[in-house]
Structure formats: C-alpha cells, structure tokens
Amino acid sequence: MSNNRIMLLRADDVLDIYVEPYIHSGFRLPNQPYSYYYRSLFSLHNETFSVWIHLLGTLILLGQIFQQLSQLIIHTNSMILCIYILYNCFGACTMLLCSAQAHLLHSRTLADHLRSFYLDYFGINFYGFTSGLILYKFSYKDNQTSNETWYYIQLSIITLYSLSIACFCKTFYRRPYPFSHKCLQCSGVLLVYVYQLWPILKILYSTFVLLDSKKVLNDHEEKALFWHLLQFLSFILSGLIFIGRIPERFYPGGFDVFGQSHHSFHLTIFLLAYCQANAVYEDILSQLSQEIELNLIKDLIFTLFVFILQLITIIMWFRISRPTMERRYKMT
C-alpha cells in the first residue's frame, strides 16, 4: 500500500478524460489489475473521499431503512408498505453504489472509464424513476390513479432521455468542455427531478410562501413537508456545487485530495436521498388511516421494464462510444 501512495501521477501524466478541472495531482496508475483499484480504497488519492462518501452513505441509508421498518411495524401490519420502503431504499442505494464504483474504477482503462460512468448515469436515472414512482404513490396529495400509467410512461421516457443525454455528452464532448456541455448534461437530471417534484413544490409554495391558513396539516404531514424542503434545497445546492466547482476554482491544485467540490456534491446527493426517504416515510404515516390504492405487482413490472430499458441504453451507448474514444485517443 505504501507503493500505491507514492506512485501517484499528475494530470499531465494521464488522459484528459480522467482529469477534472482544477485537479492537478493524486491520480492512480492506469492499466493496473482490478485488485490495485480495490486496494486503493484504503489509500489516499483524489478519488478516495468521492468513493467513501457514497459507500458510507449507503450504510447510513440501510440503517435508516431498518429504523423506519421497525417503527412502521408498530403502526401497521401492512407488508406492502414495508416493501415500498425497501423499494425506495433499493433505488437510492443503487445510485450511490453505481457512483462509488465509477470513481473507484474509471481510471483503469478507457473502456473501464466509459463502462463505469455509464453505470453511474444508469444509477442516477434508475433512482430518478423509483423516486418518482414512490413520490407519486405517497407524496402527491391530489394524484389521479387513472393517470398513473401515463405518469409512469412519461417518467420512464424522461429518465431515458436524461440517460442518453449524459452518454451523448461523454461521447462527443472533449475537455475542456464548453458551456453547452454543462447545459445538456444538467438538463436531463433537472427535467427528471422537476417533473417528479413539481406537485410537491406547489404544496411547499402554498404552505411556506403563501402561508395558506385553510390547509390543516397533521404532525406527520408537517414533518414530511420539512423533509421535502430539505430534499429540494439539497438538490439545488448539489447543482450549484457541480457547476461552480468551488473551492478548487480559486486554488487549482490545492484541493486535489480533500475538500474539492465533488466531495461536497456527493454529500449533497446523499442528503437528497436521505431527506427524500424521511419525507416519504412521514407521508406514509400521515395516510395510515386512509385507504391507499396500491398495485405492487404493476409497479414492480414497470420498474423491471425501465431497469432493462436503461441497461440496454447504456450497452448501446458503450458500443457507440468505445470505438469513438479509442480513435480519439489512438488506442487499440
């Protein structure tokens, strides 16, 4: 492990596709066995904290789900509600683990870089679908069950668009990226998030801005809105951090190993998932006395369908991207 710590490279020594703006050092050796990168989990380099924030975040989400299930069993005997909570956690953990593996393995080879980051994009958009489904089921106060299928279809199309746009940007743009790259890259995720959260944003606006006194909220509804607000603020903050690249923008090379904006970005993404899970849990508790129409089989079939479509999408993009990248970098 001491050799791994010593033999770190500078940005000039690796392909520019492995290099983030304003990060000058701390790069691991390319073309090493996979075991080298797994061992690098316990070494200090410029991806160490990016990986560990999401690995530890996954453990926290699993602890959160255990606590929620333990409390839910006290309030209800509904196994279906427990499955929906597990479903929500599965989507969030998939996103965090896909991101962690991307930062762990992306600098091994060009093919590994594409494969790992396409899985990262898959995790983001798969969570986009599972989160949207859960919010529709439990957090939309005026959802129309008759429109449920149409909502799922629209959400799946938007997540596929977001996934394809991310792969397109990875394939056809090269560093230093122009401003259009950021606009395209962010447009997909922004569209997914706004589409699924728009009904909740309207509730937040009427509650916290218009101060609607006619709406009487119970204790769980108030807590749910608080967590939804934190979820929304986490998303906004993550976008600002991703675009701004602060603080390394003002001190290039000074935050290569610790403190770079991508560490903060990963933390806000974890907080988004954590707050969303708490919000949905409180929404579920607020509706226990009501009759909620649930169709678990339908939801699982739709999710499996989207899961397969998204995997097919990244496989297709990988086959397009790999020869394009190899020609660009003159690799065989």
Image (cartoon, rainbow, N blue to C red):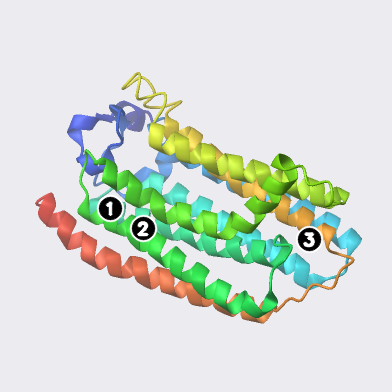
Q: Is residue 313 left or right of residue 192?
A: left
Mark-to-mark CA distance, 2 and 3: 33 Å
Residue bearing the label numbered 2: 118
Earlier in the chain: of badge 2 and badge 3, it is 2
Element marked by disc 2: helix
Is the C-beta separation of discs 2 and 1 under 8 Å? yes
Q: Which residue is mark 3?
A: 284
Residue 106 drawn at (x, y percent) = 33, 48
* Relative image position of residue 318 (x, y in whole percent): 28, 64
Check disc 1 and report the residue beneath it.
170
Residue 10 position (above or below residue 50): above
Amino acid at pointer 2: Tyr
Between residues 201 and 316, which one lies in front from this camera angle?
Answer: 201
Q: Earlier in the sequence, mark 3 or mark 1?
A: 1
Secondary structure of the residue carrying numbered label 3 = helix
The amino acid marked with disc number 3 is Ile
Q: Residue at x 75, y 55 (%)?
A: 281
C-alpha separation, residue under disc 2 versus residue under disc 1? 9 Å
Q: Quadrant of residue 163?
A: bottom left
